[in-house]
Image (cartoon, helix red, strand yellow):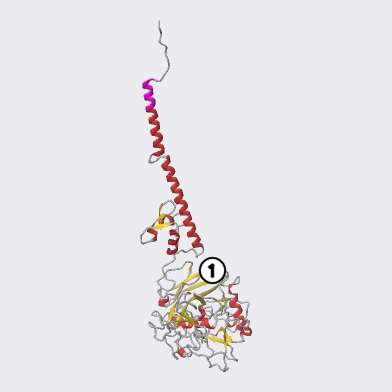
Amino acid sequence: MNKIKSTKGITLISLVVTIIILLILAGISIATLMGDNGLINRANDAKIATEIASIKEEIQTDILSEQAGNNGNISDDTLKGILEKYGILSEEEKLIDKTLTTTKGNHEIKVADIFNGTTVKDVPKNPVISDKSGANKPNVDKIAQKTYVTWNLNETGTEYVPNDRQTTQPDDWYDYENGKWANIKTTNSGLEAYWVWIPRYEYIVPTSTTETEIEVRFIGTDKKEGAIGYTKQSDGTIQSNDGYTIHPAFTNAGNGGFGELDGIWVAKFEAVSNTPTASNGGGNATNLKIQVIPNQPSWRYIQTTNIFTVCGNMTNEGEVLAGSTVDSHMMKNTEWGAVAILSQSKYGVFNPESSTGANGDATYQVWNNSSRFYITGSVGTSKDANSTTTSAYNSANGPKASTTGTVYGVYDMAGGSWEYVAGCLNGQENAKFGVKAGDSKYVDLYTNSSNSYSNYDGAKIGDATKETKGWNSDYSVFVYSSRPVFRRGR
């Protein structure tokens, strides 16, 4: 009998079932890899997130680097420039509302997300200053341990209270258009000093023998010798084609080699020693340290060589400008003149907010400090008072003794004690200041051929000697052999 042998194999049904199972498994695998939440998409999302995080970190590092070099501040323009290094910004008006489309990866990142990350929070912005005068922004980068100073009247309206604890620049810090000059305060080792910014400017040199408004306009350092429209004159000054002279205190040729300056910081009050109650405010000593504060006896009866020394010491350790990289020095005659000339402009006592000008008593004059009491920042009972005083710098009448007629100006430039400045007859600079012959960087040198205090032929443009001689009935003399050093302020 024939027998059919049994063989083991895959039946059609099992084959079909196997194929179905394989298809199901393949579908699951494809969905796992390729679905909306698949491994490939998730890996791609992770890659994009990593790229975005890396770009944001690079941008935030750039922002922090900019802030570190700018006292924690950063302007919108600088922020925009940093962002545009990484891509294209959308068209929204406010920077915080914009979206950055990155060059790398073509990612869209909201600017707000960059600023609100863990690296950068509440990015500080430079405030929008309302000043329309064109004055150069005050240069504070080289000054250590400083605060920005503004003033407000107290509740009774009789005293100005300084807000001198502002470590970041406030919106209302300065407005030269309205007689509000920039003020800062430096502190160190218990010492204090107030400073006022005098921006670079050019002016029409006055020829009038009576007081008048001086035409002044602020300029940048691009306006200088060799610039289009500016030529050097025979007297060494730089003049524009329309007759304006750049004040020499700001030009390298005029200031003896300090360079083309965007402005200078000057003391707000007469100098005070760290022991102001001592005889004559400190007397003839070099071991004392300078302060610049109001309502204290000014430092008097100190020899010019010692004045020169203590002024140069101000950046030393333990001094009020310690840590600063500025060139502190005794005020030169032309630097004093730069303040005096600016005070006689629309940015000084002729400004609309002046307490002594357009909205004041219409004298357009800095009131005298009392010359008998020698208290810094004080003011006499009238514009010409020289023996009595009723109020100090922070009283209702105080601003009348300021160069602006507001509390923001420089005080003690009229009245008070005599103020020696670094200006003398040629050949006397070493004996009077310890400056080597020919070094005009720290002292203005003059000649007086007639040996008379009334001869101004040797006057310099910008020093406010001959230019404003006798204005407001002020006492005025020129240096001569018996008095070879300039004294200002009375």
Percent across and percent down for residue 389 are 48, 85
Answer above or below: position of 23 versus 259: above
Q: Is the magenta stretch mostly helix, strand or loop?
A: helix
| Residue 70 as seen in the image, left or right of residue 316 | left
Q: Position of residue 221 (x, y in %)?
A: 48, 74
Residue 29 lies, with reference to residue 130, above or below; the image says above
Q: Which of 345 and 362 is in front in this view?
A: 345
Quarter of the figure with residue 56: bottom left
Residue 153: tell me if it is visible.
Answer: no
The residue that disc 1 covers is 145
Front residue of 53/106: it is: 106
Say which residue appears at 45% left-offset and 50% top-offset: 51
SS assignment at label 1: loop
Q: Where is residue 165 in the image (x, y as percent from the top left)?
A: 48, 68
Quarter of the rendering containing residue 84: bottom left
Task: Answer whether residue 18 is magenta in the image.
Answer: yes
Picture coordinates of residue 294 (x, y %)? Answer: 51, 78
> The magenta stretch spans which residues?
11-19
